[in-house]
Amino acid sequence: MIRIRKNKTTRKKLTGPQTGKPVAEKAGPKATENKEQGKKRRFPYSKDSRGQKDMRGKRDVRPSPRFPEEPKVREEDLEKGAFVLPGELVGTTEEFRAGEGTTVITGDIYSSATGYVYIDRKSRIVTVRPSTNTPNIMKVGDIIFGKITDVRESGAMVEFAGIEGKADRKIVNATRLGDIHVSNVRDSYVKRLANEFRPLDIVRARVIDLDRLRLTTAENSLGVMKAYCSNCKGELVLDKDRKKLKCPVCDRTETRKLAVDYGKGIK
């Protein structure tokens, strides 16, 4: 009887593409060195690499070059462009950044106001400055010019003419006559209001109450700027003492609450 002898062979562990698992490589001195270098690259602020405090998990507060600070637009860098209307194309986001008075739609920059285009080529910003005037709205503290229309025991009524510095423009919220109450004429006591104001007088006053349109002339710079004779309607001029007004036509003398610059700047 013939026996077949089976040779014992060492079973080799399948690795690589045969099992789909990576081959386990024995760690040598070179692999250990690479691993240590990887740690140093991953944590540049660790004690192990530079001997400094470990900054892992801390927020890096250093400025990032990807997000620079917003550049400031300087007037000397601005270049004036064309006059545009709302909706007109003024540039693209590839060329400029949208500034005031503009809007961005699918990469294009359009004007959102009526005015002139200004370009800052250093900071690459395009803006549109409105050329239309804003409404002339009276505020508390504004100095106004007006004409006296009526004088009563309690106060004088004033028809608004304009705001100082904007006298050529109509006041939007001057919907009725202003009122200079007798207590707001002077710093001192006023015995008779007819000695302070007369109809047709041109006055400079300050707004102290918008709801009731209250005015005051109780300052040296405020009061009557131009007055007319109550007898012949001639223009009154200051006498030598600059305390009273005199009519050059009928020689009548009258008094007013005068501004220090009476007769100047009023035609």
Image: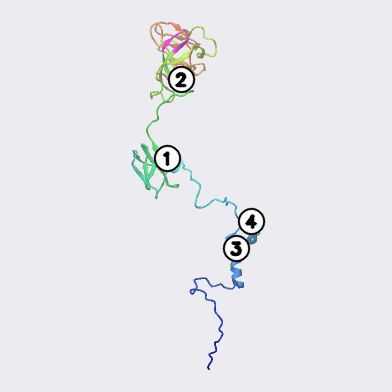
In which image quadrant can residue 263 be found?
top left
Quarter of the image containing the C terminus? Answer: top left
Dot 4: within a 10 Å radius of its alpha carbon, few (fewer than 14), some, or many (20 or more) residues?
some
Q: Earlier in the sequence, mark 1 or mark 3?
A: 3
Q: Give the spatial CA distance, label 4 vs label 3.
A: 13 Å
| Residue 185 on image: x %, y % | 50, 13
Write down the region rendered in magenta: 149-156
Q: Which of the two labelled residues, at mark 1 and mark 4, occupies the earlier sequence position?
A: 4
The mark lying in front, picked from 3 and 2, is 3
Q: Is residue 238 visible?
A: no
Q: Are marks 3 and 2 in contact (CB under 8 Å)?
A: no
Q: Nearer the viewer, mark 2 or mark 4?
A: 4
Q: Which of pointers 2 and 4 lies earlier in the amino acid sequence?
A: 4
- Is residue 89 visible in the rendered structure shown here? yes
Which residue position is annotated with label 2?
211
Mark 3 → mark 2, Cα distance in angstroms:
74 Å
Q: In this picture, is 94 found above or below 160?
A: below
Amino acid type assigned to the residue bearing label 1 in the image: Glu
Q: CA distance from mark 2 to mark 4?
A: 66 Å
**Element on which disc 2 rests:** loop
* Amino acid type at mark 4: Asp
**Looking at the image, how many numbered discs can be counted on the residues?**
4
- Disc number placed over residue 39 in the picture, else none: 3
Specify which label sits upstream in the sequence, 4 or 3. Answer: 3
Q: Nearer the viewer, residue 193 or 201?
A: 193
Residue sitting nearer the eye, 205 or 40:
40
Asked which secondary structure carries label 3, the reply is: helix
Mark 1 or mark 3, which is nearer to you? Answer: 3
The quadrant where residue 225 appears: top left
Amino acid of disc 2? Asp
